Image: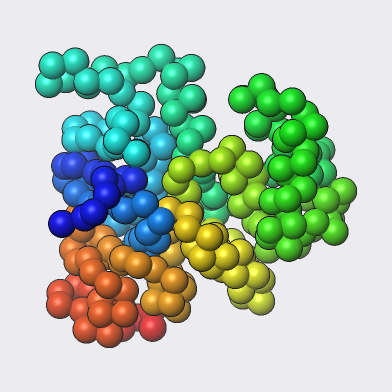
Amino acid sequence: MRATAPMLLAQGVHKRFGALEVLRGIDLEVAPREVMCLLGPSGSGKSTFLRCVNHLEQVDSGRLYVDGVLVGYEERGDRLHELHEREVCRRRAEIGMVFQRFNLFPHMTALENVAAAPVLVKKEPRAVAVERAARLLDRVGLLARSDAYPSQLSGGQQQRVAIARALAMQPKLMLFDEPTSALDPELVGEVLDAMRGLAEDGMTMVVVTHEIGFAREVGDALVFMDGGRVVESGVPRDVIAHPSQERTRAFLSKVL
């Protein structure tokens, strides 16, 4: 039994797009300060699940809680009612997300990209946001490139700026959707190192990844998904070395 309430709790989460059922009853928990890695083939529902966690996609049934609070909805009786967009945005601000593509504003410097959301969304004084942005760029090893525009940065540097930008909102939970998949192989390590640093600092993280080494070394929990279901879960080293399910074994034999 967990000593503390989960930071992320999914209960029977279903999601379909038309006739295609993408999530078929996802149940999982992520404890505070835990790093959970999600593995699985393309189309298994991993990215859709992340998008449901921060309400970029609506669930069809089930419940998602972050720090004990429903994401995107309020419960009246036994039914969910979607919140007003302003309240959705307020709750979403507590959940940082880093995508495959960096999506930085091309007309803003690295520092401006990181400082923008706290000023625009949280109405923070610009000086406060800029000071935090500088600290976060230093944290991901890019303080010296504060005045560089995205076009002047490598893909790995842009992704590290994107991580700093997500952290600028001071989230309780960080979601990573295959953050290294769009990078050249030689740039992957610098992004994984930045994520490793976050894990060491105690950030709660859910990471969709094919980086098995990262999952083994940094992850506290590993979940293997296929066909919109959780097929297997456990301690990363155990699941990777001795998967109990044939589907997990077949997947790992191709990616290891």
Residue 102 visible: no
**176 or 124: nearer the viewer:** 124
Residue 82 higher or lower than 111, as above or below: above
Residue 125 screen position, x and y as percent: 74, 25
The residue at the far left in this view is 78
- In the picture shown, does residue 239 fall above or below 42? below
Given residues 150 and 70, the one toward you in this image is 70
Position of 209 compared to 79: left or right? right
The quadrant of the picture occupied by the C terminus is bottom left
Position of residue 199 relative to residue 128, above or below, is: below
Q: Position of residue 31 (x, y in %)?
A: 31, 53
Quarter-of-image position of residue 197:
bottom right
Left or right of 43 on screen, residue 226: left
Q: Is residue 254 left or right of residue 160?
A: left
- Residue at 27%, 85% (x, y): give it: 241
Question: How many callouts does the rendering have?
Answer: 0
Residue in view at x 46 percent, y 32 percent: 92
Residue occupying image coordinates x 44% and y 71%:
218
Residue 89 x %, y %: 49, 25
Q: Against 98, is 121 above or below? A: above
Residue under the image location 22 percent in, 84 percent down:
242
Task: Indicate the quadrant containing the N terminus: top left, top right, bottom left or bottom right.
Answer: bottom left
**Drawn side of residue 103 relative to residue 26, left or right:** right
Q: Nearer the viewer, residue 134 or 40?
A: 134
Q: Can residue 55 be seen?
A: yes
Residue 85 in picture, x, y percent from top left:
45, 18
